[in-house]
Image: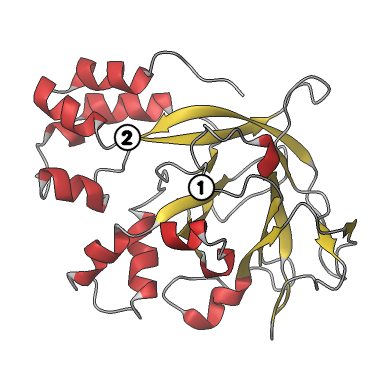
Amino acid sequence: MTQSTADPLHTLAHAHLPTDIAERWIGLLRPSLRLERSTDPGTDRVVGRLGGLPELPEGEEWPVWEGNGPLSFITAIDCAGLPSTAPGSALPPDGTLAFFYFDGQLDDGTALVMPDEPDTWAGARVLYVPADVPTTTRTAPEGIEAYPEVPLTARVESTAPYPGHPSVHREFGSLPDGHALWSEGFQDALWDHFRGTEHRLGGHPNPVQDAVETEVARGALGTPPWDDPRIKDEALRWVLLAQIDTDHDADMMWGDAGVLYWLIRPEDLAERRFDRAMFTWQCG
C-alpha cells in the first residue's frame, strides 16, 4: 500500500481555479483506494482479485437472480489486506467481500439491472464472508464462464466529486455553464489525472454520464419524478462501496466501456448490512 505525501489534486485545483473556489472544492475531496493490477504478485501486497472463482461458505448458494439465472463472480476483496488507516476503514477489519453481477452471459444482455426497477435488484449482490467461516472454491454454474483472474493491489488516492454531485450543489449552488468548475482546462486536467482503468473502494465515484448517487437515491425513494427535491437529499446519504471499471486484462466489458457501481449508506456499512447496498452502472 502506497500513499503520496503530496496530493496532486490540490495542485491541480490551484493551477486551474480561483483560490477561493479551489479551497472550497478541495474541501469536497474524499480519499479512496484505487485497485490496480499487481505486476508482481510475489512481492506486491495483493488485496483482492478480479475474476477467477469465488470462495463461499458451506451452505451458501451461488447468487441467483430468480427467473433469469446465476450471477457472474466479478471481484473479491480481502479486508484484512486493507490498513485500518486507509479510506474505507469502516469496512470490516477482516473477512472477504465478494461482488456478483448478472452480466448477460445467459441472455445476451437482455435483462438489465437498474436502480429504478426493484424487480431487477437481485441481479447484483455483495456477500460478506467473515474470516472465521470455512469456505470452498466453487465451480461456476452451467452457462457461466469465469473471468480471467487478475490480482489486485491498492494505493491511496484522493477523488473528486463530479460537478453534478449533490455535495457540489450544496457547496456552490447550481453551476452555470461558465462556472470555473466546468472550465475546459480544469475538466481536461481532471480527465488526464484519472486516466486509465479505474477500480475503487470508497471515495467519489467517477461517473461515465451523471452522478451515480442520484440514480441510486431515486431508486431508493421508489422512483419519484427526477425533479423531486428529496432525491438530492437522499443522494447525500449514499457513498461508494466499490467501482469496477471495464478491464481488458480480466476480459470485462460493461456495455460500451462502462463501469459497475455499488453504493451503500454509511450506517449500513458500519452494521455490515451489505445486503442493503444498491447497484447501478453506466456506459458511454
Residue that carries the numbered disc 2 in the rendered image? 29
On screen, residue 266 above or below 31? below
93 sits to left or right of 8: right
Q: Is there CB contact under 8 Å for labels 1 and 2?
A: no
Q: Residues within 10 Å of mark 1 (few under 14, many from 20)?
A: some
- Does the rendering let one see residue 164? no
72 sits to left or right of 229: right
- Which mark is nearer the camera, 1 or 2? 1
Give the quadrant of the N terminus.
Answer: top right
- Give me the residue at 36% from left, 58% from top: 213
Q: Which label number is shown at residue 90?
A: 1
201 sits to left or right of 100: left
- Give me the residue at 55% from left, 78% from top: 120
| Residue type, numbered disc 1 | Ala
- Give me the residue at 80% from left, 71% from top: 60
- Dot 1 or dot 2: first in sequence order is 2
Q: Residues within 10 Å of mark 2 (few under 14, many from 20)?
A: some
Task: Where is residue 280? Give x, y as percent.
Answer: 48, 62
